[in-house]
Amino acid sequence: MKKQSLIIDCDPGVDDAVGLFLAFGSPELDLLAVTAVGGNVPVSRTGRNARILRQIAGREDVPVFLGADRPLVREPAGAGEFHGAEGLGDLPPFEPPFPATPGHAAEAIVDIVMGRPEGSVALAMMGPLTNLALALRREPRLAARLGPVSVMGGARSEGGNITASAEFNIWADPDAAAEVFASDLSLTVFGLDATHQVRATDARIARIEAIDTPQAQAAASMMRFSQRVEREIVGWDAPPVHDPVTVAWFLKPDLFEVRTCRIEVETASDLTRGHTAVEFRGVDPATARHHWAVTADADGLFDLLAERVA
Ligand code: RIB
Ligand code: CA
């Protein structure tokens, strides 16, 4: 089987964790690195959390690099209320024995991608886009060299989840997102329009809970945490599990329907900061660079997850 080389950039984060476990258990992927960014919680915690998760999954072979501890311009703002102060729900944090690999995440992305054949390394973005923006600034040839890039971020029909008009990953660092979307990269973007269709219902969580592996138990515990928080804060009882879509797309793309589009990000207005203007009109499929996910098959994604955390 030809493996897909992949770097995952993330801010674990309970749903990032589920996405990482999906990747750690998928033999189709050659996971070259996990890079951490400040987002849900500061990068000191997202980096440690990535190391905790790779240990739980028995994947200490995958290097973890620490990246940006703050957005390009804006002040750092987390989402601890949805992920717990430590970032992994109520999973007890610990300091894993295996350290992060020295060097900034942006540098690691550049070195790995530029050191391999053109188009061979893919990227899954699960948090604010700061590291990718920094990597593009560091190496302008990166966009042409990268393979497929999936991004969890933005919202169109669903409205925002951090403000009325913006989704957290884009809102947290709108300037980085604006640079990434305006670059020559071709992005497949999974906004809330798609990820709000992927919900951790009781039945789906119970299915993962019934699997007796450390990663399944950890994933289920974190989704239970999300369920409790969602009930308290939002009143829903089935929290969206956003980030695994960025990995599932590489494993089973037919789980999703995507449409060609133009995407621009609001950076000038405080009121609508981080809004993603996703335009389908007047887009020439021959030249359109971005795709926007409009549907996601939640049952199919949980089938995949159950299989890969087993
Ligand atoms: O809006 C959802 C996104 O913000 C997810 O990536 C979640 O982990 C948070 O970072
Ligand atoms: Ca995330």
Image: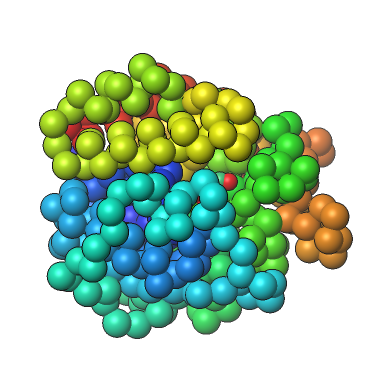
Task: Report the side of 225 relative to 306 (left or right).
Answer: right
- Residues 49 and 153: in front is 49
Q: Residue furthest top?
A: 203
Residue at the image point whose x is 84% and y is 64% from the top: 268
Q: Quadrant of the C terminus?
A: top left
Q: Is residue 184 visible?
A: no
Q: Percent from the top left, x then y, of residue 126?
A: 47, 52
Q: Quadrant of residue 269?
A: bottom right
Task: Report the side of 120 relative to 234 (left or right).
Answer: left
Q: Quadrant of the N terminus?
A: top left
Q: Is residue 79 visible?
A: yes
Residue at the image point whose x is 44% and y is 73% from the top: 67
Q: Percent from the top left, x then y, of residue 107?
A: 41, 79
Q: Quadrant of residue 27?
A: top left
Q: How many marks?
A: 0
Q: Percent from the top left, x then y, of residue 201?
A: 43, 22
Q: Residue furthest front?
A: 232
Residue at the image point whose x is 19% and y is 51% from the top: 56
Q: Is residue 264 above or below residue 236?
A: below
- Residues 88 and 180: in front is 88
Residue at the image point whose x is 14% and y is 37% from the top: 213
Q: Is residue 67 above or below residue 34?
A: below
Q: Quadrant of residue 63?
A: bottom left
Task: Report the side of 229 relative to 292 (left or right).
Answer: left
